Amino acid sequence: MFRSLFAAFLIAFSYASASAAAPNILLICVDDLRPELNCFAVDYIHSPNIDRLAAEGRSFSRHYVQAPTCGVSRYSLLTGRYGNYNYGNHLLAERAKRIKRGEEVPASMPAYFRERGYRTVSIGKVSHYPGGLGGEAWNDRSQVEMPNSWDEQLMPCGAWETPQGAMHGLAHGQTRQDQPKKSMPVFQSEEGPDDIYPDGVMIEGALKKMEELSAGDEPFFFAVGIIRPHLPFGAPAKYMEPYRHIKLPAIPHPEKPDFPTTWHRSGEFNRYQLWGKNPNQDQEFADEVRKHYAACVTYADALVGRLLKKLEAGGKSENTIVVLWGDHGWHLGEHAVWGKHTLFEESLRSPLIIRVPGMDRPGEMSGSIVETIDIFPTLADLSDLPQPEYIDGVSLRPILADPTAPGHPAVSYTKAKTIRTDRWRMIRHANGYVELYDHETDSGETVNAADEHPEHVADLMQLLEKRLGL
């Protein structure tokens, strides 16, 4: 009887009844995950577990992050606010310093739920540093990245010893810090179980914590951060197997732009051992890189599957909202870039899937434009909690009820700033230069149409300034 009544409330997305239990929240963050998933129409990718989550929830084909960097993007996820890009990956650390100085700082998303009776736990890479600590090896407990937010913040490191070692680790404890400069392979695929790579150790800790949380009486906010497919592209060989002999589709618009853009030289990628090869000039090597990226996606998918299975085994699945979020996209040769950090579509669009038990029309993808800053208000809304007044995002509850409900323009930024509408992407550079791309005719963002459409530039400039309070 209780389950049927509760399901009815969930279908209506209402937790207003005092008799209904507060929903648990499972937030799964995946690093550098572009929409390279079968459920996002990339048919050669093996992602059965995330595909099942999408079939049971609402996926968003046009979800945009606030910045194409880990730290700034995760700041927006965890605060619901636009951030100052000038602090880069240290944006959360700067926020922590303000709190330490006694300044009034709006509550983070986990702090907001913690203040309302939730047990909040993070494990893996949820904020910028895996485990949520700063310091030389990212394990200094005096440098908490998100003060007053988590009851526990964990990062099992195994043979990699420190969060810094695990972040850029390859099989059997190999770390980038232990290697001569540019000697760590950009990709690797060794035989063995999941735990020969860092994420496998992390997920074992996550499964134990999930079991503990499921046995408790408190509602929980549990965030799990998977590192792969972040560089270096290392995954157990079994996940590479589906890709070894396939023929990949051609890389779309692989040419470097011949006009000013936020293009860059793939510096992060070039920090690794490339064996003297250039993927922009060597198609065979480019395909090897892409296949190892795909193997890392399938590895991450398997870890997601194990986590969801543990949630179901603990009997909490019917009262848990699940969010899967990619912190930004990643170029795999588009525009001759191998990395993130641009303001092109490939860097800014990432997967977002939200599953609410008993929801209407599950499995229908929404093409409405949404932003990462919308996740915080959405989870507050679905939990029947008041909307925080200090956040910049809006609840996606209407789109969860109806996938055709309208979204809103998305704003992203580096030192330049961009706004994405249904038709247009406009990028405004600090020196006043403007890029304008018409997605009705140029889905690859290869032709700057700013001079042809000054009226649209003016309208979008005004909208961008209004959104960012410039």
Image (cartoon, rainbow, N blue to C red):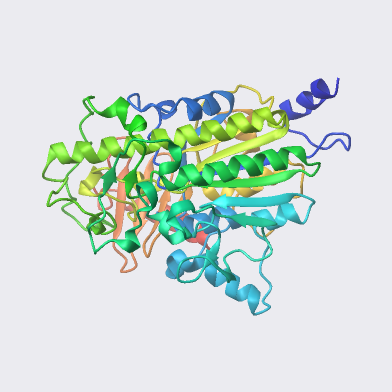
- Does any portion of residue 388 appear in the rendered image? no
Closest to the observer, 386 or 463: 386
Q: In which quarter of the image is residue 331?
A: top left
- Residue 291 visible, this orientation: yes
Residue drawn at x 66%, y 51% is: 121
Q: Nearer the viewer, residue 470 or 52?
A: 52
- In the foreground, 452 or 53: 53
Query: Across the whole image, how many numbered discs are drawn on residues?
Result: 0
The residue at 73%/32% (across/down) is 319
Quadrant location of the N terminus in the rendered image: top right
Q: Residue at x 78, y 40 (%)?
A: 22
* 437, above or below 432, in the image: above
Compared across the picture, whether 400 is left or right of 11 comes to left
Outermost residue, bottom side: 101
> What percent of the width, then of the height, locates residue 130?
50, 56
Q: In this view of the protein, which residue sits in the foreground, 113 or 189?
A: 189
Residue 138 in picture, x, y percent from top left: 49, 65
Residue extending furthest toward the right:
19
Q: In which quarter of the image is residue 388?
A: bottom right
Estimate the x, y position of residue 414 in percent, counting from the top left: 39, 61
State the image coordinates of residue 165 (x, y, percent, origin top left): 41, 58
Vertical placement of 432 versus 112: above or below?
below
